[in-house]
Image (cartoon, rainbow, N blue to C red):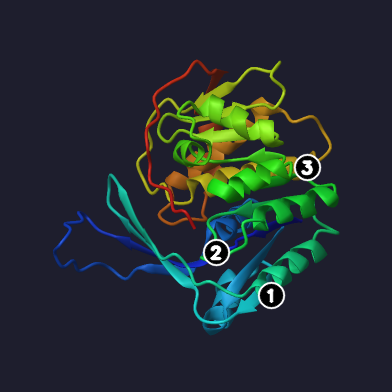
Amino acid sequence: MIVTVTPNPAVDITLTVGHLDPGHTHRVAPGIRRAGGKGLNVARVLTRMGTQALVVAPVGHNDLDWFGSDLGRIPSSLVEVPGNVRQSTAVVEPDRTTIINETGVGVDAEFWTELLATVTGRLTDATCLVVSGSVPPGCPDTLYGDLVAAGRAADIPVIADATGTQLRNAAVAGATVLKPNASELLDTTGESDPVAGARALQSMGAGLVLVSLGEAGMIAVPADRAEPVLAARLGRILTGNPTGAGDAGVAGVAALLALNARAHLDTRAILARATAWSAAAVLEPIAGEVAPARIADLEREITISAYEGQATTGTQKRES
């Protein structure tokens, strides 16, 4: 079982329009509303691919029943907190996606203590821990570090997808894999070169660092400097909804690590898996979905080679 933690869940709303004209009124087809956030997206993809996942998240009292119902057959341990869950709205056009995220509502320290205890209590039978996404105002700076430390104490691999202080603390706590995008890496380390940024995190204690470069693909920076930095990319640019693509990549890595928790990290296999699952998610209309039949085809299209440096191309990411 893979435990996913979403510190700042959201009600994800996806609207599809032919063309977004800011400042004007639009009439659109009914949107898709679902329980969301990065860790929830990871759990949905894992479930779709036949791997058992457990969702842990703090959920506002007013949305608690709906959240649990929307998760359906995905097991969950939801920590009840006051108020509502924030909203994250994606407006999808044929060639771009605009994302509007609420920041979330701060909660008292006691709820974060309860969240950490809930996660720790579910790690006995876990094969991997994933901690993903933003944090609401007032969240302790130590949260990601504490969660990573709990996973390491349980002797399971830990993947963290975050930015800023939380990402740095996840590195210090010894996360097995970190998965920032190029922008998050720059914001966190001040390094515009993704390899230098990854090395900065590894100097703090992180293991493998996967960096998404948007349309330019993904790179894998091993902690062992004797191993080469690898780059993966498709031979074509995909059009679709990139929201949740990074989460699908994390799901792929988690599923691989859960099967080989104590084996040497196979950087090439991890990079290929992350890239293929991410690409499959772009082809789906909403976050947290992949079509298993597409993944094998995409894996055959991926080229992996030594990384020689390249310009990054930004794609929108739903920082949920």
Q: Looking at the picture, which amino acid does disc 2 mark?
A: Asn
Quarter location, residue 66: bottom right
Quarter location, residue 204: top right
Dot 2: element: loop
- Mark 3 is surrounded, within 10 Å at the Cα level, by few (under 14), some (14 to 19) or many (20 or more) other residues, namely few
Residue, x 42% and y 25% (percent of image)? 235
Q: Can you see residue 302?
A: no
Report the front residue among 30 and 91.
91
Residue 96 in the image, given as x and y percentages of width and height:
30, 47
Placement of the N terminus among the 4 image quadrants: bottom right
Q: Distance between the residues labelled 3 and 1?
A: 35 Å
Q: Looking at the picture, which amino acid does disc 3 mark?
A: Leu
Q: Looking at the picture, which amino acid does disc 1 mark?
A: Glu
* Residue bearing mark 2: 8
Circle 3 or circle 1, nearest the eye: 1
Whichever of labels 3 and 1 marks the residue nearer the N terminus, that label is: 1
Residue, x 57% and y 43% (percent of image)? 249
Q: Do the residues labelled 3 and 1 touch (CB within 8 Å)?
A: no
Q: Can you see residue 198?
A: yes
Number of on-image labels: 3
Residue, x 32% and y 51% (percent of image)? 97
Report the front residue among 17 and 261.
261
Q: How far apart are marks 1 and 2 (CA)?
A: 16 Å
**Where 132 sits versus 14, above or below?**
above
* Left-right relation of 80 to 3: left
* Residue bearing mark 1: 110
Dot 1: element: helix
Whichever of labels 1 and 2 marks the residue nearer the N terminus, that label is: 2
**Where 216 sits versus 314, above or below?**
above
The label number, if any, that marks residue 287 in the structure image: none
* Left-right relation of 159 to 249: right
The label number, if any, that marks residue 259 in the structure image: 3
